[in-house]
Amino acid sequence: MSGRRQRRRRNRAPVPVAEPVTISGVAEGGRGIARVDGKAVFVAGALLGERLSIAITRRHERYDEAEVVDVIDASPDRQQPPCDYFDQCGGCSLQHQRAPAQIRDKQTILLEQLQRIGEVTPDDVAEPLSASAWNYRSKARLGVRYVHAKQRVLVGFREKKQRGVVDMSVCPVLDPRVSAALQPLSETIAALTVRERIPQIEVATDADTVVFIVRHLDPLQMEDRTLLREFADSSGIRLMLQPGGVDTIHPLPPDNADPLAYELAAHSVRVEFLPQQFTQVNLVMNEKMVDQALRWLQPQPDDRVADLFCGVGNFSLPLARRCQHLVGIEGSSELVVQASRNAQVNGISNTEFICGDLFEQPAGLPADFDRLLIDPPRSGAQQVCSSIERFGRRGKPPAQLLYVSCNPATLAR
């Protein structure tokens, strides 16, 4: 056995730390920060202020990773996780912490990274937006695994510590309609001839519809299609099949291809999207976020506004209701088409949607904007931020800039 394999195997066996540690800081993903012999240790499942026994699960040059062995002095924010699968499931990382404390710690992480990475201290910090912590996920990617020993198919999130799939029959964070379908879906897949060649299911929902996108690595037989259609009919769930890349996704049956949609009621906007297209997983929080964004950006009736990384028009369409002209720029031509359709559906005629690569120097893209909204992926918007001036009027930055971020580290940079 090679030394590399031996090192990997040793890393998988937790090594107890002799003395208890105290958690002095918090990090992303439900991890607490302690120090052992001066070295930072990120402890999964630990809360601020707790005194714990821990074991090292992985060593690195500058820091180590660890797990909790025993909670000696618990935080008042600690709770019993409501989900029976929490300890093994990779779908959630914070159920052991009360919801208000989760929000507090996330804000702490954001402010710390802005200061440490971006060397910025905000003048004002708004009250965090919040919504229910349960039954909110409108989208998910579920793993599928056929287990020979059990003669069963598991459908669920990936495990935290292994590469397997959690054997789950219910999920308290998923849309209840999805959770209720997990067991019958598992039984249906187990009866397919390709049951060992289905790696994952993509889930998308709106207020009226649930869609499952079934990824299959081998062609489906006629009896497979019949079983899947019977499942769809009995459960009320729409099915789509994906034999290859994203461009191979198609509905089963072929005529059942209507888009999903959500409402932004305060702005009289209906946003339609295809199940495979990106939307926020928490639609209640999304509506609050859009409302907040417009309050902060304050578009005026004579403004030219740009929405960068505009997607299907989540921010663009409400903004267009309040400004003279809205330009949405997006790297995916498919999303540009969908955003344009959404403008038509809503009777909005003062928009222009353009396909452009915002990860390169933005030369050639439209300019002369009064206000700018940026909503990039987790990798951030480094090129855009280094060229803000070119988007404004007469070589000056736009009067207002709003950056919507899902990653505090790239926001800080």
Image: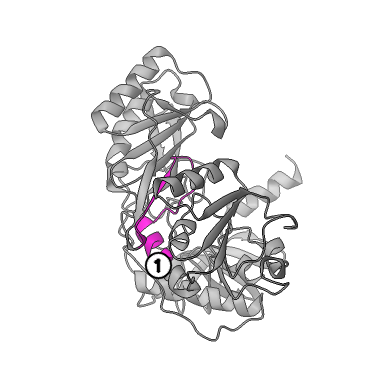
Outermost residue toward the left in this view = 234
Indicate left or right for 234 with 289 as reference: left
Can residue 99 be seen in the rendering of this structure? yes
Residue in the foreground of this view, choosing between 225 and 193: 225
Can residue 38 be seen in the rendering of this structure? no
Asked whether 161 falls inside the magenta stretch, the response is: no
- Relative height, residue 147 to residue 350 (above, below): above
Residue in the foreground of this view, choosing between 170 and 370: 370
Indicate left or right for 9 with 88 as reference: right
Q: Please provide the residue range marked out in magenta.
A: 267-290
Question: Going 59% across and 42% down the picture, which residue do you hit?
Answer: 333
Residue in the foreground of this view, choosing between 181 and 303: 303
Q: Quadrant of residue 205?
A: top left
The image shows residue 44 at horizontal and vertical percentages of 50, 63
The residue tagged with tag 1: helix, strand or loop? Answer: helix
The image shows residue 403 at horizontal and vertical percentages of 56, 68
Residue in the foreground of this view, choosing between 118 and 402: 402
Question: Going 35% across and 21% down the picture, which residue do you hit?
Answer: 191
The image shows residue 360 at horizontal and vertical percentages of 73, 55
Q: Which residue is mark 1?
A: 291
